[in-house]
Image (cartoon, helix red, strand yellow):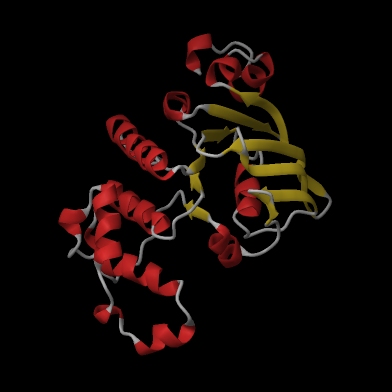
């Protein structure tokens, strides 16, 4: 399969301390992959580089063959990289529909944003995005009034509004109950399949990782120590030592 995301020899340090060392991998178009590792393994730094918030000291990030490393979050987003965050933070003062209309307006030229008030803009795209994530019935609610799970759905809709080819999701089910986690990831999987979208997510809940990722990448102290199917990663001795400890039961992953 053709790689949508290609990472080559990525190296990042803070001061003299390496945080990522020679990280490289390919993720094919349409794949759902998980990135796991203990706290401090380098997951957040890698996500920030992929999303444009950080620049690597060396190495290459390619999106569909085009270099995007170090281009900044907005430029990387325009190239087709979306992102959701561990702590959902939609525009709480706005309505649910208005939050999505604002995302649509942000991609327009500045002169149009100034001339056309938000309330006068077409609602069709926003309403379609809300339908995609199951929030159509809450279109007129304020974002601040949403439950935690619905706020996560709104954040997903906001990311989908820009039509990403690659969606980076940082701890998408953090704070959710087990059943709610599964329903949310089923939603993500369905939207990715419909759009042909590639997804890379970080997650501490191993049931979510091994239940929904077709591929698992494991970071340990800034190095990629495993990259393969959930089954292969589950049985990898180095992963078990680094992530769970030598005496963890096999079914813990």
Q: Between residues 31 and 65, which one lies in front from this camera angle?
A: 65
Q: Residue furthest front?
A: 1
Q: Position of residue 221 (x, y in %)?
A: 71, 35
What residue is drawn where x is 46% and y is 48%? 86
Decide if residue 235 is on the left or right side of residue 161: right
Q: Against 53, is 42 above or below?
A: above
Q: Quadrant of residue 158?
A: bottom left
Residue 66 image position (x, y, % from top left): 68, 54
The answer to whether residue 222 is seen in the rendering is no
Left or right: 204 with respect to 124? right
Say if 115 sits above or below 10 in the image: below
What is the x, y in percent for residue 201? 51, 40
Classify 68 as above or below 197. below
The residue shown at (38%, 69%) is 104
Frontmost residue, 187 versus 67 = 67
User: The N terminus is located in which quarter?
Assistant: top right
Residue 117: where, in percent of width, then height?
31, 84
In the image, farthest residue toward the right: 16
Please give the name of the residue rendered at 36% of the width and 62% of the height, measured from the top-left corner: 90
Q: How many marks?
A: 0
Residue at 75% in and 54% down: 56
Q: Can residue 150 be seen in this snapshot?
A: yes
Quadrant of the rendered structure where residue 39 is?
top right
Q: Look at the picture and state if 243 lies above or below 7.
A: above
């Amino acid at each position: 399969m053709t790689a949508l995301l290609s990472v080559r020899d990525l190296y990042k340090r803070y001061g003299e301390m390496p945080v990522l060392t020679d990280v490289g991998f390919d993720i094919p178009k349409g794949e759902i992959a998980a990135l796991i590792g203990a706290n401090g393994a380098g997951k957040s730094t890698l996500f920030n580089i992929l999303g444009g918030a950080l620049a690597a000291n060396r190495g290459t990030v390619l999106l569909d063959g085009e270099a995007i490393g170090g281009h900044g979050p907005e430029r990387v987003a325009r190239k087709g990289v979306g992102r959701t965050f561990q702590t959902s933070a939609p525009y709480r003062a706005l309505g649910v529909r208005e939050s999505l209309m604002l995302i649509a307006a942000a991609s327009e030229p500045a002169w149009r944003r100034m001339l056309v008030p938000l309330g006068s803009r077409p609602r069709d795209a926003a309403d379609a995005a809300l339908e995609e994530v199951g929030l159509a019935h809450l279109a007129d609610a304020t974002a601040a009034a949403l439950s935690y799970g619905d706020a996560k759905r709104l954040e997903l809709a906001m990311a989908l509004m820009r039509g990403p080819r690659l969606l980076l999701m940082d701890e998408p089910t953090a704070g959710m109950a087990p059943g709610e986690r599964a329903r949310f990831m089923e939603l993500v999987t369905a939207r990715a399949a419909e759009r042909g979208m590639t997804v890379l997510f970080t997650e501490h809940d191993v049931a979510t990782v091994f239940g929904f990722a077709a591929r698992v990448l494991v970071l340990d102290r800034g190095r990629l120590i495993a990259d393969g199917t959930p089954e292969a990663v589950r049985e990898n001795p180095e992963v078990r030592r680094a992530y769970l400890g030598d005496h963890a039961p096999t079914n813990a992953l």
